Amino acid sequence: MRVRRIAALTVKEFLALLKDRKSRTVVLFPPLVQLIIFGYAATFDLVHVPYAVYNESPGKAARELLAKFSGSQNFRQVARIRHHSQIAPLINAHRVLLVNQLWPMAAIGLATLIIAARLFRRRMY
């Protein structure tokens, strides 16, 4: 019963809004302008995202992951980090947007993830 009352109240308020010319302009005009402006201005294409690598994992899986990043047109490696204290200055200076940090035990998790992705791909086809 409550939902019906809320729905009726919502309809009543929208009808009252649409009857008044000023209210109608305030409610309809700004979203239309935003739709037009942001439709042309906003983009979600990731191209040449600068990133740094902090690789503490000597494993094959980590090398494969980094090879995929470096082979991509969407990412661009700009720094190789040797110590964790180098991360904050790079991000604060806006030199990088992403730090790809691979921990020493990450190879186990990455290998598991790669195997799962390959198995999933086989099931898809």
Image: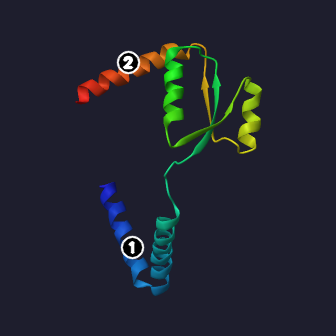
Q: Horizontal and vertical percent for residue 40? A: 48, 67
Q: From what the image shows, is residue 102 above or below residue 42?
A: above
Q: Residue at x 48, y 81 (%)?
A: 25
Q: Is residue 111 left or right of residue 98?
A: left
The residue shown at (59%, 40%) is: 76
* Residue indicated by mark 2: 115
* Number of residue marks: 2
Q: Disc 1, disc 2: CB below 8 Å?
A: no
Estimate how packed mark 2 is, as few (under 14), some (14 to 19) or many (20 or more) residues with alpha carbons within 10 Å.
few
The percent position of residue 124, horizontal first and vertical second, equals 25, 30
Viewer-nearest residue: 47 or 35: 47
Tag 1: residue type? Answer: Phe
| Alpha carbon distance from label 1 to label 2 | 54 Å
Q: Say which mark, if any, is on residue 14.
A: 1
Left or right: 72, with 88 as reference point: left
Q: Quadrant of residue 96?
A: top right
Q: Quadrant of the C terminus?
A: top left
* Type of amino acid under label 2: Ile
| Closer to the camera in the image, 114 or 6 | 114
